[in-house]
Image (cartoon, grey):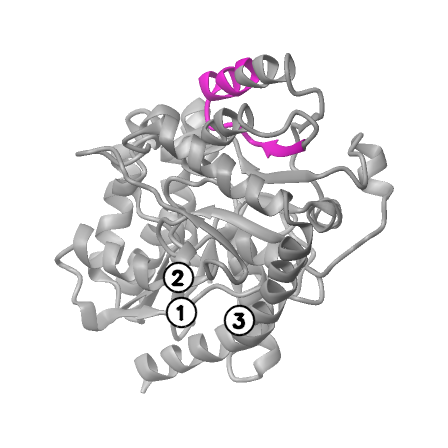
């Protein structure tokens, strides 16, 4: 299994996916798993190699060329494997080259698609063209492409028409419901100045246009001033994006005193406790192939208000586990709503409706956890993944 992220360096949904999938595959006993990841050495029995950019690249090793050098190292390191499974564009090219080099099947999981994230050009510059090349080359040649939602499967076939739909398999993400469960303690709230008992909306995500944090900040102007808004907002894509969020937060604080901004990647235990205490979890994403963060909130018995994009409607059941907010994309573009003011108003209305009816919010929270337990366990994800491996190796 080839991945950029692996514990303790996990910052997104793809990293969480690989962490749990690798462990659960091992527990199944049907697959011998070896993980190759980026970064420092790990003290983990599943990690067969941790790879760093080539030193010969110098300063360029910190960019996309460094990623390619890691992919080359990974491809060379998997000799003897029966199959290689890559995750995200960071590792997809490594999987493709390993398949060619060693004559083994390549499975590529599409957690997102580069052509549907044009804002990445702000972060990567010319590297965005290279990341798109890596992804396209790998997906078009892969023996199987795993899409984390039916919406993602449709996107794969639309964006990459050279990919045979028969090679695309939908396997949803999962969650560890023993880790993500209601935690009504208060230590993490006290540490970050979050007031228990006050009507609370929480956002957890990176500071990126994809996650829609700017739209939530706009929506917050329409919420009751007594509502507490907790923003767990770490890892900005660009300095410009970080500055824009800071500007809007400062403007919001002028009339909304109960705003808590946590500008760091929190440990899992902290996120679980903060989400558990919230009345509403807000996911205003403009692009979300799956939306694992919504599963995490549902597992903590917190009602979700989310934009109806990508795979989110496959997770959040409107009126049952939360509320879906219609998202009309800007014509001819991906990256924002056609009418930002209306989208912000709709977000605020959906959030307010649940805050005004705590009993209904609690009911949807309980229904959310039940849905997680019935449909989104890692054991089920691993079993379906192992079945795919067996088909390819038959």
Res. 48 in view: no
Determine which residue is flagged by label 1: 171
Q: Could you tell me how far apart the alpha carbons at marks 3 and 2 are, in whole angstroms?
A: 20 Å
Where, quadrant-wise, is the C terminus in this rendering?
bottom left
Determine which residue is flagged by label 3: 33
Query: Residue at point 25% right, 54% down?
Result: 155
Query: Residue at point 65% right, 28% down?
Result: 263
Dot 3 lies on which element? loop
Q: Callout 3 environment at 10 Å: few (<14), some (14 to 19), or many (20+)?
A: many
- The number of callouts visible is 3
Q: Could you tell me how far apart the alpha carbons at marks 1 and 3 are, in whole angstroms?
A: 18 Å
Query: Residue at point 37% right, 43% down?
Result: 287
Q: Position of residue 10 (x, y in %)?
A: 59, 47
Mark identifier at residue 148 = 2
N-terminal of the two: label 1 or label 2? 2
Tag 1–tag 2 contact (CB < 8 Å): yes
N-terminal of the two: label 1 or label 3? 3
């Amino acid at each position: 299994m080839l991945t950029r992220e692996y514990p303790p360096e996990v910052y997104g949904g793809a990293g969480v996916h690989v962490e749990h999938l690798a462990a659960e595959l091992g527990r199944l006993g049907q697959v011998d798993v070896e993980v190759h990841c980026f970064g420092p050495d790990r003290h983990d029995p599943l990690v067969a190699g941790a790879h760093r950019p080539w030193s010969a690249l110098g300063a360029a090793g910190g960019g996309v060329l460094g990623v390619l050098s890691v992919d080359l190292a990974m491809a060379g390191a998997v000799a003897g494997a029966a199959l290689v499974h890559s995750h995200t564009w960071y590792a997809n090219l490594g999987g493709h080259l390993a398949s060619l080099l060693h004559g083994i099947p390549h499975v590529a999981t599409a957690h997102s698609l580069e052509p549907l994230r044009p804002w990445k050009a702000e972060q990567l510059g010319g590297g965005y063209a290279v990341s798109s090349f890596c992804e396209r080359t790998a997906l078009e040649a892969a023996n199987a492409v795993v899409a984390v939602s039916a919406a993602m499967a449709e996107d794969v076939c639309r964006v990459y028409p050279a990919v045979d739909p028969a090679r695309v398999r939908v396997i949803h993400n999962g969650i560890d419901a023993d880790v993500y469960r209601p935690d009504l303690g208060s230590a993490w709230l006290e540490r970050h100045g979050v007031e228990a008992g006050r009507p609370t909306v929480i956002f957890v995500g990176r500071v990126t246009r994809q996650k829609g944090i700017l739209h939530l900040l706009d929506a917050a102007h329409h919420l009751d001033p007594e509502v507490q808004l907790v923003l767990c907002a770490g890892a900005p894509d660009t300095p410009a994006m970080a500055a824009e969020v800071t500007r809007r937060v400062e403007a919001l604080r002028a009339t909304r005193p109960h705003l808590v901004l946590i500008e760091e990647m929190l440990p899992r235990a902290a996120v679980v406790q903060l989400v558990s205490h919230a009345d509403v979890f807000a996911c205003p994403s403009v692009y979300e192939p799956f939306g694992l963060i919504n599963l995490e909130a549902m597992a903590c018995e917190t009602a979700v208000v989310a934009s109806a994009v990508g795979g989110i409607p496959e997770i959040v059941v409107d009126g049952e586990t939360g509320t879906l907010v219609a998202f009309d994309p800007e014509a001819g573009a991906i990256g924002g709503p056609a009418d930002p003011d209306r989208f912000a108003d709709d977000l605020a209305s959906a959030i307010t409706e649940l805050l005004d009816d705590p009993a209904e919010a609690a009911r949807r929270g309980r229904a959310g956890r039940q849905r997680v337990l019935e449909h989104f366990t890692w054991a089920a994800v691993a079993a379906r993944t192992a079945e795919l491996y067996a088909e390819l190796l038959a």
